């Protein structure tokens, strides 16, 4: 974008930032004049720049002012300032007006700066050390300019009212190394009023919790980075494993339908795309968003109809639904809300056991699996947070399902959980794996991985005052302690059968290990668990990297992830399973773990 195309609010074209500085020097009034010139422009950036689109606010009163600014930046819905300070060619390209008045995702970059594989503002784009921030720029007085370009780590302009009309300032705030003018600095859990819509998260070069704090609360003590997005704001280097694996997936499977041999709307695709979502959140690379969108669009009609069947089949076929609220926030397209509404209604058709626990599959009467919690409950938590139309159902259901299975599968000796539980009421055939209490016999790594990731993702979306939320936090803290004690001292990884590491035929498993690294890192970042667990995550991350190889063409491969499997009757059934390379489970784990561990 040339300087001639910029028109800052209240400033003629010819009065560009450099011209203002030169004029100040000529008049000998540099300091005072710049202050007088800068304040209106900065205020204009907060108000939405010279051109404001008035998209309708979502439920709860999301701000719709601001929309699209022509000054080189994108406003997030929490009132984050636009980057209006530079006419450098690769400045952020704002998209159309999305929900809550936030700029939509552009084809060039997802509301960050020039983006690229590393995301965020580069030396040639956004606010640079050479270009600086002039008095007419849109960077907040608390932001400043870093030497590497972009807003300082303290971040952007504080949100004026938050997405839902009652929030306060951004918690994670501003862009980290990338992202111009705080486009990644949406309000987190403090930014949405009760029942309000989170609007669109700041999907810039550095956003972490890009759900915009939807469903959070200003009083949340653990409100580090709201939303299922995961950890803190930051960016990923172009040579990071997270970006390398994401790019490999785009290269190897241009059509996301081919990620796995499984067909249709099902979890093997969905979990890999959930990992891609996490990389997008830390890079703003629009290719990743387009890839996710392509898969969902291939499995739904233009009007938002997804064929889930007339009756419940399995939670495995519902897992990709978690991407629907995310896509709605990033694009503002109503079809994604329409589809999400239909998925929510489908929960009313899922059969339950006598205690109200959802069956894992229609063909497995009265069986609850840890796997089911990840496949089904994060959608409800995210749906309730983003759309604000779920009443008490979403939060209450998430807590009930998560704590019910914990009560029946907890191993008090380790703080970990057995793979599954069968409830004998109403009467059904007892599965071969169930003991006298209906519990399975083995603590399987990946089942635990599903459960650990579900906990941190859902806690980020549940309101701080959600009844039973403290029980979920307690489950997470106990689980973290169990992970610490069962971590292999030599490799830093975790075993296929977690509490049987001393057995010679047991082996460390990649996918569960990556899931634990992700869950622990996010839990530490948000204050869910003590900071001492960061060393556990770091050690696991070092071990996980040893499972990465490079093929002849220079593309990365993640090795050692166990194949998909059902509940087994014994220890031997778990350790006799095959291990795969670049399987959906392994890719999911490395993408999520790397996205959090490598963020800068």
Image (tube, grey):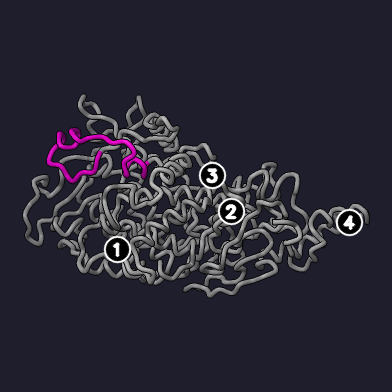
Task: Look at mark 2 in the image and give the residue it sits on.
Answer: 112
Q: Which of marks 4 and 3 precedes in the sequence?
A: 4
Mark found first going from the N terminus, 1 or 4: 4
Give the alpha-carbon distance from disc 2 to disc 4, as whole Å: 31 Å
The residue beneath circle 4 is 23
The residue drawn where x is 31% and y is 56% is: 319
User: How far apart are the two marked residues, 2 and 3, measured between alpha carbons?
Assistant: 12 Å
Residues in magenta? 563-589
Q: Secondary structure at mark 3?
A: loop
- Closer to the observer: label 1 or label 2? 2
Find the distance from the CA under tag 1 to the CA under tag 4: 63 Å
Point out the tag, 2 or 4, that comes first from the N-terminus.
4
Residue position marked by numbered label 1 in the rendering: 397
Is label 1 in a helix, a strand or a loop?
helix
Whether the magenta-drawn stretch holds residue 206 is answered as: no
Give the residue displayed 26% in from the left and 38% down from the top: 562
Q: Is 584 colored magenta in this rendering? A: yes
Sequence order check, earlier mark of 3 and 1? 3
Check disc 3 and report the residue beneath it.
Answer: 117
Q: CA distance from mark 3 to mark 1?
A: 39 Å
Sequence order check: which comes first, mark 2 or mark 3? Answer: 2
SS at circle 4: helix
Q: Residues within 10 Å of mark 4 (few under 14, many from 20)?
A: some
> Where on the picture, by quarter, is residue 423?
bottom left
Residue 530 in sight from this viewpoint: no
Residue in the foreground of this view, choosing between 433 and 205: 205
Q: Residues within 10 Å of mark 2 (few under 14, many from 20)?
A: many
* The C terminus, quarter of image: top right
């Amino acid at each position: 974008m040339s300087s001639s195309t910029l028109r800052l609010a209240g400033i003629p074209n010819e009065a560009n930032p450099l011209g203002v500085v030169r004029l100040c020097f000529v008049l000998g009034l540099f300091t005072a004049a710049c202050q007088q010139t800068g304040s209106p422009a900065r205020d204009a950036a907060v108000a939405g720049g010279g051109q404001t689109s008035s998209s309708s606010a979502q439920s709860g009163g999301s701000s719709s002012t601001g929309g699209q600014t022509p000054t080189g930046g994108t406003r997030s819905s929490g009132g984050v300032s636009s980057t209006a300070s530079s006419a450098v060619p690769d400045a952020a390209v704002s998209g159309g007006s999305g929900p809550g008045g936030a700029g939509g995702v552009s084809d060039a970059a997802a509301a960050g700066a020039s983006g690229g594989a590393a995301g965020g503002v580069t030396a040639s784009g956004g606010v640079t050390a050479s270009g600086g921030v002039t008095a007419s720029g849109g960077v907040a007085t608390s932001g400043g300019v870093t030497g590497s370009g972009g807003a300082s780590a303290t971040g952007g302009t504080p949100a004026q009212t938050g997405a839902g009309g009652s929030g306060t300032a951004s918690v994670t705030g501003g862009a980290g190394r990338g992202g111009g003018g705080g486009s990644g600095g949406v309000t987190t859990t403090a930014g949405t009023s009760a029942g309000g819509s989170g609007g669109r998260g700041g999907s810039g070069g550095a956003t972490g919790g890009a759900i915009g704090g939807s469903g959070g609360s200003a009083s949340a003590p653990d409100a580090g980075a709201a939303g299922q997005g995961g950890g803190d704001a930051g960016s990923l280097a172009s040579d990071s494993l997270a970006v390398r694996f994401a790019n490999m997936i785009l290269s190897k499977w241009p059509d996301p339908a081919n990620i796995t041999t499984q067909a249709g709307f099902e979890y093997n695709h969905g979990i890999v795309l959930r990992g891609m979502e996490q990389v997008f959140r830390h890079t703003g690379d629009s290719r990743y968003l387009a890839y996710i969108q392509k898969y969902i669009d291939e499995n739904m009609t233009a009007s938002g109809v997804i064929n889930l069947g007339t009756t419940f089949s399995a939670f495995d076929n519902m897992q990709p639904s978690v991407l629907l609220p995310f896509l709605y926030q990033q694009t503002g397209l109503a079809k994604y809300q329409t589809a999400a509404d239909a998925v929510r209604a489908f929960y009313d058709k899922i059969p339950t056991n006598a205690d109200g626990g959802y069956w894992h599959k229609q063909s497995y009467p009265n069986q609850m699996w840890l796997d089911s919690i990840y496949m089904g409950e994060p959608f409800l938590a995210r749906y309730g947070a983003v759309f604000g139309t779920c009443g008490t159902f979403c939060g209450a259901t998430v807590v009930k399902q998560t704590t019910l299975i914990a009560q029946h599968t907890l191993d008090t000796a380790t703080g970990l959980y057995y793979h599954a539980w069968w409830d004998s009421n109403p009467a059904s055939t007892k599965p071969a794996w169930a003991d006298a209490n209906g519990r399975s016999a083995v603590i399987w790594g990946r089942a635990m991985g599903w459960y650990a990731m579900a906990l941190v993702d859902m806690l980020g979306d549940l309101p701080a005052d959600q009844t039973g939320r403290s029980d979920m936090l307690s489950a997470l803290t106990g689980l973290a302690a169990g992970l610490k004690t069962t971590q292999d001292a030599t490799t830093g990884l975790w075993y296929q059968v977690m509490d049987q590491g001393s057995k010679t035929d047991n082996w460390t498993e990649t996918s569960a290990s990556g899931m634990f690294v992700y869950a622990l890192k996010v839990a530490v970042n948000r204050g869910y668990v003590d900071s001492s667990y960061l060393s556990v995550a770091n050690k696991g991350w070092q071990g996980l990297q040893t499972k990465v190889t490079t093929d002849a063409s220079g593309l990365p491969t993640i090795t050692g992830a166990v194949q998909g499997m059902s509940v087994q009757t014994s220890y031997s059934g778990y350790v006799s399973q095959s291990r795969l390379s670049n399987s959906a489970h392994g890719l999911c784990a490395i993408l999520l773990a790397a996205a959090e561990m490598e963020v800068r």
